[in-house]
Amino acid sequence: MQAEHRSYASRGYAGELAAERARSLAGRKFRARAFYGLILAATLLVIVALFVLLAAIIVDGGGSLFRDFPSFFTSAPSRYAHMAGIKVALLGTLWMMAFTVLFSFPIGVGAAIYLEEYAPRHWLTRLIQINIANLAGVPSIVYGILGLALFVRGLALERSILSGALTMSLLIMPIIIITTQEALRSVPLSLRQASYALGATRWQTIWHIVLPQAIPGILTGTILSLSRGIGETAPLIMVGALTYIAFTPASPLDPFTALPIQIFNWTARPQEEFHGIAAAAIIVLLVTLLAMNAGAIYLRDRFQKRSEV
């Protein structure tokens, strides 16, 4: 009888334990569904807000863009909205981004290769990595203040394209370093070991094996970082990009303006006509960003197919 009683007690305890586990599992499932629903609602809210903003920009700027299509791209800024264009700002943006790539890409990729492939693993390397990660999250206005103090005044480059490009290079270089490091880490270690086994040096292994495998990720990260830089306004205001300039730049030391600065200038005017051409300039900037992102996807797919072959 005592053994039978113990058997019933153990069965009852097991049943209570199973019921408790079932209730706990049901609670976890409910919280997981609630969290998933919350994240989904937040995502849909952001997407709807984005489409509303895009629709408002297209409605406001589409008319100005298509009505003045040829002259909008070939005219300089003007006091009159129907005569104003984005030629100077667009060329200034292209000049600045070209020099930004020239400065940031080799330095950023070279720094990532050194940190990932050559630098010893000790406290100083970890400190450098932490600082690079922190620099990637620093507000852009801080880079503008640094560019003003270092390039505009310290190196006496004045308020030129070169100052803007160097400042923008500082802004995007931490992102290039981080994305390049991630691309280098994604290359399997077995490829490096096979190269060393065949007698290749470390540099030969990096140049002929690692970089061809990592180049899709490197290019994608670089172009995405440039996409961030092309839309920045605060650093350019700090280094002195002009809000009104009537001539196109002819050298890296010339004064300049950029599309974000021109858009800011037009939206600050009280006349409604300038708001329409500002929306048209935003459309041009968005198309440029989409083209850059599409180029990143194309280059990534092309180099991935080449590496697979």
Image: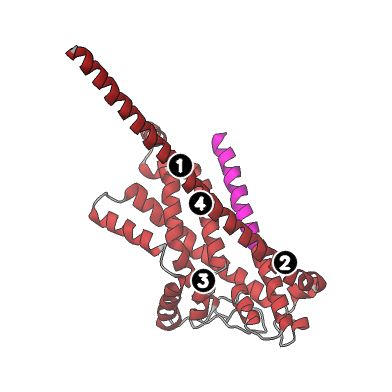
Q: Amino acid at mark 1?
A: Phe
Does the stretch in magenta take in 293?
Answer: yes
Secondary-structure class at tag 3: helix
The percent coordinates of residue 42 (x first, y second) are: 54, 55
Question: Which dot, 4 or 3, sits closer to the camera?
Answer: 4
Mark toward the start of the polypeptide (1 vs 4):
1
Tag 3 residue:
165
Mark toward the start of the polypeptide (4 vs 2):
4
How far is disc 4 from disc 3 in space, using C-alphas? Answer: 41 Å
Tag 4 residue:
38
The residue located at (24%, 21%) in the rendering is 9
The percent coordinates of residue 254 (x first, y second) are: 57, 81
Q: Which mark is residue 30?
A: 1
Mark toward the start of the polypeptide (2 vs 3):
2
Residue 255 higher or lower than 190, as above or below: below
Q: Which secondary structure is most common in the magenta stretch?
A: helix
